[in-house]
Amino acid sequence: MIFNKPEHNGIRLDSDSFANHGAGSLSESIEAMTSTETPAGKPKFSGLEIIATTAPYIFLLLWGSGFGVAKVGLQHVEPLTFLTLRFGIIVVVVTPLFFIMRPSKPTNFKDWFHIAFVGVMMQAVYFGAAFTGMSLGVSVGAAAVIASTQPLIVALASPFVTGERLSGLKWLGLLIGAAGAVTVVVAGTRFDGTIDYGLAFSVLSALGMSAGTLYQKRFPVVAHPVTVNFVHYWVGLLGVLPLALMLETMQVEWAGELIAALSWLVVANSIVAISLLLFMIRRSDASRVSALFFLVPPVSAVYGWALLGEVLTAGSLAGMGLTVFGVWLVSRH
C-alpha cells in the first residue's frame, strides 16, 4: 500500500468531515456499507481503508486519460473557452449540492483563502496552462511527460516549504521515475527541440500543480469535500472566464467528439480525480503522492494505443517498467 498512517493535517476529506451539517447520517450510511464488522462490533475493513487502497489506481486511470481526451475536445473549441464550459457545468452541479447538504466549512477568512488559493493553482493555472499548451501544438505525450516532472519540483521545494526530508532511496526513485517517464515519450515521439510558447505553458501547468500541492501541505484546512469542490471550481471559473473573454473568440463547434470529451472531463477528471487527489495528499506526504504523476505518461500512452491506435514501442514498454519501479522506491516505508 502506498500510504502511511493518516496524518491529522491537510484538507480533511475523511468521514469525520461528513458528519454534521445537512447530511448528518451520510457518513454513517457510507461506513455501514463499506465496512465489515466482527462479532465484537469492531470494524474489520473500514470504508476509508478501502478508498485509500484503491484511490491511487482509480486516480491514475482517470487522470491519465485527461490529456488525450482534452486534445480531442480542443479540435473543436479554444482552450480557455473549453475550460469555461467545463468549470461552468461543474459549478451548476456543485452549487445546489453545497446549499442542500450544508457541509462543514471553514470558520474564518484565512481558511477560505487557503482553499481558494489551492483551487486557483490546481484548476485555473494547471488546467489552463496545460490546455493552452496543447492547443499551441504540444503533443499529448509531451504534455504528459512535462506534467510528470511535478514530483521533482515538489521534492526540491518540500524541505523549504513543508519541512519534509527525502532519503537517498527516495531521491533514487524520483530520478528513475523521471527517466522512465521521459523514455516512454521519447521512444514514441519525434521532437524537434524547439522551445516555444506551447512548451512554456506546459511547464507552467506543472508548476501550478506543484504549488497547489505544497501550499495545501503547508497550510492545512479542515473541510468537507463538497465545500472544497465548491470553492475550487468557482475560483477556477472566475480565473479563466475573464481571460477567455479577452483573448478568445469563444466560438464552439458542438460536435459529438466535443460533447463526449467535455462530459468525461467534467465527471472523471474534475469531480472524481481531484477529490481523490486531495484525499491522497491528506493521508500521505507530498512527495509520495506526487510520485504518482510519474505514472501519467505510461497510462496516457496506453490510452493513446486503445483510443487512437498509437503504437507502444519496446522503448515505451521499458520506460513504463522503469517508472513503476521508481514509484515503488518512493512509496516504500
Image (cartoon, helix red, strand yellow):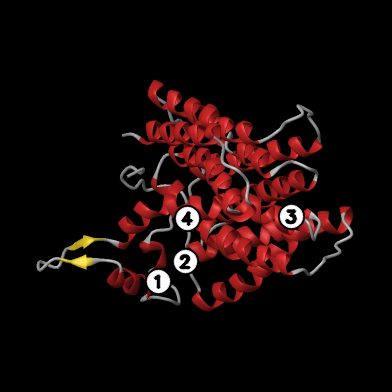
The tag earlier along the polypeptide, 2 or 3, is 2
- Near mark 1 (Cα within 10 A), the count class, few <14, some 14-19 or many ≥20, is some
For marks 3 and 1, give the CA distance.
Answer: 31 Å
- Quadrant of the drawing holding the N terminus: top left
Q: Disc 1 vs disc 4: which is toward the camera?
A: 4
222 on left or right of 98: left
Q: CA distance from mark 2 to mark 3?
A: 25 Å
For label 2, the residue is: 104
To which residue does mark 1 refer?
A: 20
Task: Name the amino acid type tagged 4.
Answer: Leu
Percent coordinates x, y for residue 188 in the rendering: 63, 36
Please name the amino acid that badge 2 sits on.
Answer: Ser
Q: Which residue is mark 3?
A: 239
SS for tag 3? helix
Q: Position of residue 245 (x, y in %)?
A: 86, 59
Q: Nearer the viewer, mark 2 or mark 3?
A: 3
Q: CA distance from mark 2 to mark 1?
A: 7 Å
| Three-letter amino acid code at the position of disc 1 | Asn
Characterize the local packing of mark 4: few (<14), some (14-19) or many (20 or more) Cα atoms within 10 angstroms: some
Q: Mark 4 and mark 2 in contact (Cβ < 8 Å)?
A: no
> For the view shown, which residue lies furthest in the left direction?
39
Neighbours of disc 3 within 10 Å: few (<14), some (14-19), many (20+): some
Mark 2 to mark 4 CA distance (whole Å): 19 Å
**Residue 277 seen in render:** no
Q: Looking at the image, is 93 positioned above or below residue 154?
A: below
Instruction: Name the disc covering residue 276, or none.
Output: 4
Secondary structure beneath dot 1 equals loop
User: Residue at 54% of width from left, 31% of height from top?
Assistant: 315
